[in-house]
């Protein structure tokens, strides 16, 4: 098995280096961070920049840049300020640095700014996705390989980031690229047990018949790693009849999204799309809500804009049921967002 997953590395190793001189981790937001005067020369100014990025102090970074500090100044382990900013998924800081001329395609030992964003530490996928979208809008190349022969798409598949997978593929990431071991993003998603990423890659057209250097397909790898549901999905041409049983949540969502890539544009202001809503509810194990949808004549256009209060009004009061529906609708919105028109966050989550 080591030959099949020889690319794998411990968490953090993808940074292609380490340096004790600077910890880019999150600062303690409960403590006031004191800084010397920003208008200093040489090493003092660079030290201020390091601490400003660690503390997410956008105003101080702006002041330092405006005072003449090079936006490509090398910080810990040879990274640029932009690499450090996206590695903690700080959108506002990343945008500031890009607007001051930072390169979205800088790399250190084949490890790129975009890779740093895709593997951001201690951040939500939404925060990561916004930084990735920003870099891609500034022409960051998604098809560079790191020293472990991994592309950004492979890293996103490894970590199960479906939104990031969408972003990368929509900006030209090679969906079926094979690394030195013959692995694809799909096979890597299987190896790491990322079922949602497997489904997303299949939805986007990933070739499940590609073989590794040792002749194994994605389905073969699912069997090797004992993921029976993924194995069934990859072996089946009709996900609704895997093993002759009712579709699982993942299978139902895959079938639904495959048949309805843009449900909002196809919906009509009637209950004619109810069968699709029922399929989605079944995939979410929420069949008991079908009657409520019928009684309230809920259509796709209704469902896509509903909020928690709207669900409560029609009788969907269980918090877990609400969460499943709202998170699924949010994912559909994210899938259709125009990435080049994303606006900066005014109040980015700094925690």
Image (cartoon, rainbow, N blue to C red):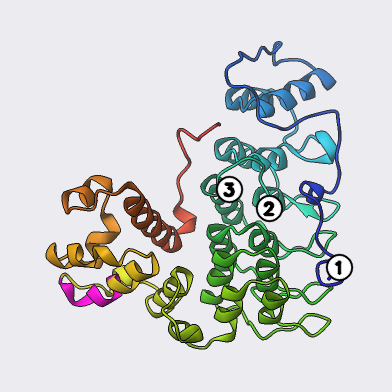
Total numbered labels: 3
- Residue at label 2? 114
Labels 3 and 2 touching (C-beta < 8 A): no
Viewed as shown, does residue 300 lie left or right of 154?
left
SS class, disc 3: helix
Are the two marked residues, 1 and 2, in contact with CB atoms closer than 8 angstroms? no
Mark 2 falls on what kind of element? helix
The circle drawn on residue 2 is 1
Quarter of the figure that contains the C terminus:
top right
Q: Is residue 80 visible?
A: yes
Reading the image, the residue beneath label 3 is: 128
Q: Specify few, some or many for label 3: CA neighbours under 10 Å numbering under 14, 14-19, or 20 or more.
A: many
The nearer-to-camera label among 1 and 2 is 1
Q: Which residues are magenta?
A: 270-277
Q: Quadrant of the N terminus?
A: bottom right
Q: Position of residue 246 (x, y in %)?
A: 41, 79
Q: In x, y percent, where is residue 134?
A: 56, 50
Which of 350 and 5 lies nearest the eye of the viewer?
Answer: 5
Report x, y in % for residue 223.
Answer: 68, 77
Task: Tell me where residue 8 sits by quadrant.
Answer: bottom right
Sequence-first tag of 1 and 3: 1
Mark 3 to mark 2 CA distance (whole Å): 10 Å
């Amino acid at each position: 098995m080591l030959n099949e997953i020889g690319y794998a590395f411990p968490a953090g190793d993808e940074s292609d280096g380490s340096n004790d001189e600077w910890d880019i981790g999150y600062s303690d937001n409960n403590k006031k961070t004191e800084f010397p005067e920003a208008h200093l020369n040489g090493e003092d100014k660079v030290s201020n920049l390091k601490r400003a990025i660690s503390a997410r102090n956008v105003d101080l970074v702006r002041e330092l840049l405006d005072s003449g500090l090079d936006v490509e100044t090398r910080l810990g382990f040879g990274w640029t300020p932009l690499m450090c900013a996206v590695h903690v998924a700080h959108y506002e800081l990343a945008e500031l640095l890009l607007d001051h001329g930072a390169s979205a395609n800088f790399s250190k030992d084949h490890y790129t700014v975009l890779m740093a964003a895709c593997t951001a530490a201690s951040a939500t996928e939404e925060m990561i996705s916004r930084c990735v979208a920003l870099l891609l809008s500034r022409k960051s190349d998604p098809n560079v390989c790191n020293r472990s022969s991994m592309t950004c798409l492979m890293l996103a598949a490894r970590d199960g980031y479906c939104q990031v997978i969408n972003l990368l593929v929509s900006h030209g990431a090679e969906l079926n690229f094979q690394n030195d071991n013959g692995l694809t993003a799909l096979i890597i998603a299987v190896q790491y047990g990322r079922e949602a990423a497997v489904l997303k890659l299949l939805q986007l057209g990933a070739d499940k018949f590609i073989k590794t250097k040792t002749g194994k397909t994605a389905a073969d790898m699912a069997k090797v790693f004992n993921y029976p549901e993924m194995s069934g999905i990859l072996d089946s041409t009709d996900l609704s009849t895997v093993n002759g049983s009712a579709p699982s949540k993942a299978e139902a969502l895959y079938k639904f999204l495959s048949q309805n890539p843009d449900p909002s544009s196809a919906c009509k202001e009637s209950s004619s799309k109810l069968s699709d809503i029922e399929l989605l509810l079944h995939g979410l194990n929420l069949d008991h809500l079908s009657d409520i949808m019928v009684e309230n004549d809920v259509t796709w256009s209704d469902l896509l804009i509903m909020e928690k209060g709207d669900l409560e009004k029609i009788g969907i009061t269980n918090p877990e049921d609400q969460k499943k529906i709202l998170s699924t609708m949010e994912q559909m919105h994210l899938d259709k967002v125009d990435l080049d028109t994303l606006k900066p966050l005014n109040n980015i989550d700094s925690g």
